[in-house]
Image (cartoon, rainbow, N blue to C red):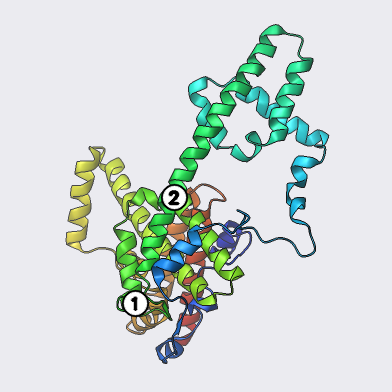
Amino acid sequence: MTLVAVLMLLIPYSTSAFNICSASSKCNLSPKCQQQPVSSFKISQHAELLCLSMTKNDDDGNDEIPSTGTPKFSRLGGNIREPSPQEISVIDDMITKLSNVKPYELPNAVSKAIRVVSSPRFFLRIAERADTEQDPAEKEKLATLAENLTATISAVVSTTEDKLDDRAKSVEDVLKCAAEPDSGDFMVPLSTDRVDAMRDKMNNLDPDSLDEGFLSTVDAWMNKSQQDGMDGMVGILQKVLQIYAGIAISRSRLELQLSVGAAVSNEGQAKADKVLAEKEAAGPDSAAAFMQRLMAIDTDAWDAELLGTFRKEEIKPNSILSEVQRTIETVVLGLENGSMAQRVQAEFLKELVTRIEIVEKKV
């Protein structure tokens, strides 16, 4: 299977959130075009006001886009109509599993299926089963489950909301760095200084904060920007995803080197650090070092960087493609299947493969 084919399997569909190197962020422009002056325009009067507006819900408390010609209440149809036999079977299986889960394990189990467990239909089914259950022990177990679920769901939802609030603050902090320091306006295309400021801010965030909540927040803000016709802000949020992908992949590659060193030496992390330091002192692998450099620079600079390196014959295209392949196998495929992190990083590397192939033809 080819490298591109593997990446396409990891990106089953492309949306504004995951098409992180689209034309709107200038990724598909040639180096010559990128160097041409592009007139900037204002997206917002002030970065902070825009970020705050994105964290607020609409008046009706719903940010979803209604389908054309479809009443708003139709979105609750799944809770109004009678469930199918297959849906009841799924609910019953989940009820049975949760009723046998130990109380201290319930929050983790609920968080993995919060949308199903928190639905009114789920509680109605518990009541129906309790009414028809003949075994007193099982009846008591179902009653206890319903009582425990009420408290557990409340705690899980509260924790999730707090976590998303924290992630929204992190995204807001990164976006503020994209604004011009003097005026507070967003100007696109972003200058090198603004992109570097965004990267510095993200590098200084707690690594644990760059998780699915962070990506979900960027995704939600990007969708809202599209709805509002703010194409420039969509491009800036795409840049956030690009920077995230570069940082996440780079960190994972370094962590992998350390863990492999520890496994090989079988003498713990301290010995692994020493082995890595000795390897760096001897001179790192050129393709690996170049890969790390590409992860640390703006994607708009990729073409010029690749072209200059290939023309000097410092690194062969096949060498860097092999490095990308190893990164996919050891980093991207190791992420949770179907997660936003996997999709974003796969899209990022897919774009890099495309650039390498295009530049190779120019050499």
List x then y, in percent, for residue 174: 37, 64
Front residue of this view, candidates 165 and 113: 165
Q: Name the quadrant containing residue 308.
A: bottom left
Instruction: Please indicate whether residue 362 sits to the left or right of residue 272 in the image.
Output: right
In screen coordinates, is 156 left or right of 258?
Answer: right
Q: Is residue 191 above or below residue 120?
A: below
Q: Residue furthest front?
A: 59
Q: CA distance from mark 1 to mark 2?
A: 25 Å
Query: Residue 345 at x, y = what percent?
Result: 47, 60
Above/below status of 18 relative to 74: below
Q: Quadrant of the N terminus?
A: bottom right
Q: Earlier in the sequence, mark 1 or mark 2?
A: 2
Residue at image location 79% in from the left, 16% down from the top: 132
- Local secondary structure at mark 2: helix
Q: Which residue is drawn at the image coordinates 44% and 90% (left, top)? A: 39
Q: Is residue 139 above or below residue 171?
A: above
The residue located at (49%, 58%) in the rendering is 55
Give the residue pinned by disc 1.
180
Q: Amino acid at mark 2?
A: Asp
Picture quarter containing residue 181? bottom left
Residue 36 sits in quarter: bottom left
> Could you tell me residue 294's position as x and y percent?
36, 70
Residue marked by disc 2: 165
Residue 101 location, x and y as percent? Answer: 56, 22
Whether residue 145 is visible, yes or no, is yes
* In contact (CB < 8 Å): disc 1 and disc 2: no
Amino acid bearing label 1: Glu
Question: How many marks are shown on the rendered structure?
Answer: 2
Quadrant the C terminus occupies? bottom left
